[in-house]
Amino acid sequence: MTAQVNVNILVVEDEQNIADLLEVYLKNDGYTVHKFDNGTEALKKIEQMEFDLAILDVMLPDIDGFKLCGKIRERYFYPIIMLTAKIEDMDKITGLTIGADDYITKPFNPMEVMARVKTQLRRYKNYNEKSQTTAKERTEHDIRGLVINKETHTCTLYGEELTLTPIEFSILWYLCENQGKVVSSEQLFEEVWGEKFLDNNNTVMAHIARLREKLKEPVRKPKFVKTVWGVGYKIE
């Protein structure tokens, strides 16, 4: 099946055989590939154009993939998939908390990567479509100084604007839409990511931790996003 025209994908991978393999599969599906073997050159290209998705290796010769991911997230919201040879859970959580959307461990099956790419592009497209709200839908929540507006895609805390990724925004919006109700990790994941929740999935936990950090929430007694142990999360 051919991909949509003019979908630009950034690949930053210093192992040439892996980069070339990704390029072949991506191009075969109709994507336009911009390939770099270092973070410095990739950053220059990022300044010149906006991509639809990025695939970043964690271990690069100059800037590591996590830092590169963070740089992208300062300005852009398109999906980011991290590639790494490490399998430790903490590395995965690190990638997710700095703004990555998915995480693939080497060695990988190229077809799995393509499936992940399509999933992330579909989620991103659906998110943008859902952001086009109608007049009948509620477009803003104001909860004790936390103001989130779906129409303008802005979020402020006591008047100070917060920089949220699309996933962080979606999580916070969904919690606000269900203010006072406990929302399970499974429910959050399936609503925000649009995929079936699997056991031992730390994705929601990692994004909640990052969201709390941006809200400057105290660890023990968060004011907004509260944990109901064994059940889920809620905003009162």
Image (cartoon, rainbow, N blue to C red):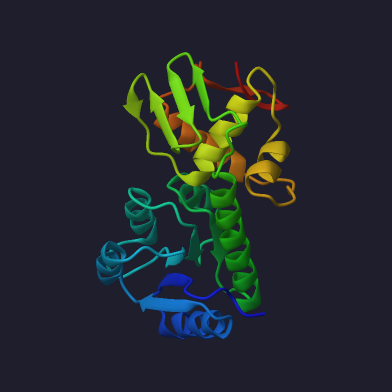
Q: Is residue 1 left or right of residue 94?
A: right
Confirm whether residue 218 shows in the render. Answer: no
Number of numbered callouts drawn: 0
Residue 183 visible in rendering: yes
Q: Is residue 63 left or right of residue 197?
A: left
Front-most of 72 and 15? 72
Residue drawn 61% across the image and 33% down it: 174
Asked if 129 appears above or below 182 in the picture, the reply is below
Task: Provide residue 162's location: percent of width, then percent of height.
Answer: 37, 33
Q: Name the image quarter holding residue 175.
A: top right
Residue sitting at 42 percent across and 31 percent down? 155
Quarter of the image that includes the C terminus: top right
Which residue is depicted at the point 38% across and 53% down?
76
Measured from the top left, where is residue 85 in percent x and y?
A: 50, 67
Rendered position, 145 above or below 55: above
Which of the two residues, 20 or 52, is positioned nearer the viewer here? 52
**Image x and y of residue 141, in percent:** 52, 23
Residue at (56%, 32%) from the top-left corner?
Answer: 173
Q: Is residue 34 shown above or below 194? A: below
Indicate the quadrant containing the N terminus: top left, top right, bottom left or bottom right: bottom right
The quarter of the displayed image where residue 133 is located: top right
Residue found at the far front of this picture: 135
Q: Is residue 16 above or below residue 83?
A: below
